[in-house]
Image: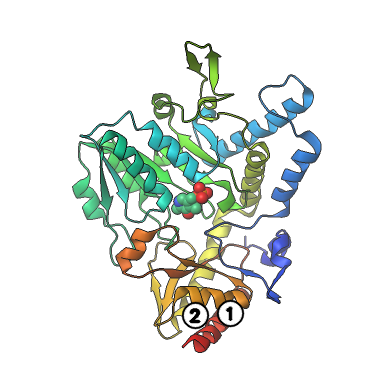
Amino acid sequence: MALDINKIREDFPILKRKVNGNDFVYFDNAATSQKPNKVIDSIVDYYKNYNSNIHRGVHTVSQEATDAYEGARTKIQKHFNVKNLHEIIFTSGTTHSINIVANGFKDLLNKNDEIIISGLEHHSNIVPWQMMAETNGAKIKVIPIDKQGELDMEVYDSILNKNTRLVFVNHVSNALGTINPIKEIIEKAHKVKAAVLIDGAQAASHFKADFQELDVDFYTTSAHKLCGPTGVGILYGKEKWLNKMPPYQGGGEMISDVTFDKTTYADLPHKFEAGTPNVSGAIAFGVALDYLNSLGFDNINLYESSLLKYATKKLKTISGLKIYGDNENKTSVISFNVDGIHAYDIGTLLDKFGIAVRTGQHCAQPIMDHFEIPGTVRVSLAFYNTKKEIDKLYNSLKQAISMLS
Ligand SMILES: *Cc1c(COP(=O)(O)O)cnc(C)c1O
């Protein structure tokens, strides 16, 4: 079934606004997605009609809020095919989720242990491991990127060994859009008994991951990249790992028994959900998944691929324009530079035409260092974008280049 894009665009109120006197064209979807009315309305509905703290009150409204919050967890369980409901921890987003695992592994590793991270990582997936390694002396090894912007799997095979305890890779690179071979990465890691954490922040808006089929040990994502609100995400972890890890934060809701001598921790998932969570955010996360599933991920994927193909072909006709990570296997992201022109200047001029793109390192400086560039212009497309908007980008870009050269 083909998507009715004009009808879909009606669901997103922000797409009607003007920027600098022009129709707003939003091509910064890899940074955060726009929100449909259903998601926005669900947040307003919570605060207007059943705002209450959860898991504590005996009263009716608290029970309604608890049911909606836990209902969202169930939607997430179904969506990602998770075995046990308590293996899903609500967090403030991917960064928080990764830090929970990095903190949890502090005491589980020692100086003979090794962890492997990929050269395609977001800063949020590099820094926490460096902080962890400083405390326990574990060695960090890196899977390098090849010229095409793909992971060099031969090097992965050679650095994986019986001392490897953890492997951390993103499912999709936010800077280039490269889709990593995570199934193969997980299978190989499991052969040496290493656990694998996949950062799915950039993947979950484009396709559905099946956690049991992948046999992944940890998976993280942020709601705001998939039409949900900011400040909420998940950490999925296999029960055996979540039980091994200590809690990340102390506070209310994460304990089962507290005296001044000793505290025993609550069962999963509450052990990792200290304090009052983002109740409306979690509920809206569930609504966002419902919305995307009502469109169908296969339909979304097909349409985004056609947009990507169209935009890539069109941009390649511009002389001096170079695309980084121009692979077959990627999501709808185009990262590029134009000879002799700074990415920032292009981004600034496109904004004058009402077009939002991202410029710079995209929180992934090692990738930029690999290509020996200071940054790129990143155009990231979503299912509510159109070919007409791409035409506008093309024309505006040509105008910008003639003004800048
Ligand atoms: C956006 C993103 C993150 C960070 O997500 P937050 O929601 O900012 O915590 C991490 N990794 C990748 C690949 C991302 O795209």
- Label 2 SS: helix
Instruction: Give coordinates of residue 378: x percent, y percent.
Output: 48, 68
Q: Report the amino acid beneath label 1.
A: Asp
At x 68%, y 75%, the residue is 20
- Mark yes or no: residue 203 visible: no
Residue in the foreground of this view, choosing between 53 and 132: 132
Q: Which mark is residue 391?
A: 1
Instruction: Give coordinates of residue 286: x percent, y percent.
Output: 63, 42
- Mark yes or no: residue 25 visible: yes
Instruction: Give coordinates of residue 305: x percent, y percent.
Output: 51, 65
Count of numbered marks: 2
Q: Is mark 2 within 8 Å of ligand 1?
A: no
**Can you say whether 352 is above or below 112 in the image?**
below
Q: Are marks 1 and 2 in contact (CB under 8 Å)?
A: yes
Lower sequence index among marks 1 and 2: 2
Instruction: Give coordinates of residue 107: x percent, y percent.
Output: 33, 28
Q: Residues within 10 Å of mark 1 (few under 14, many from 20)?
A: some
Disc 1/disc 2 C-alpha distance (Å): 8 Å
Q: Which mark is residue 314?
A: 2
Q: Report the amino acid beneath label 2.
A: Lys
* Quadrant showing the N terminus: bottom right
At x 29%, y 60%, the residue is 145
At x 45%, y 58%, the residue is 174
- Label 1 SS: helix
The colour scheme applied to this rendered structure is: rainbow
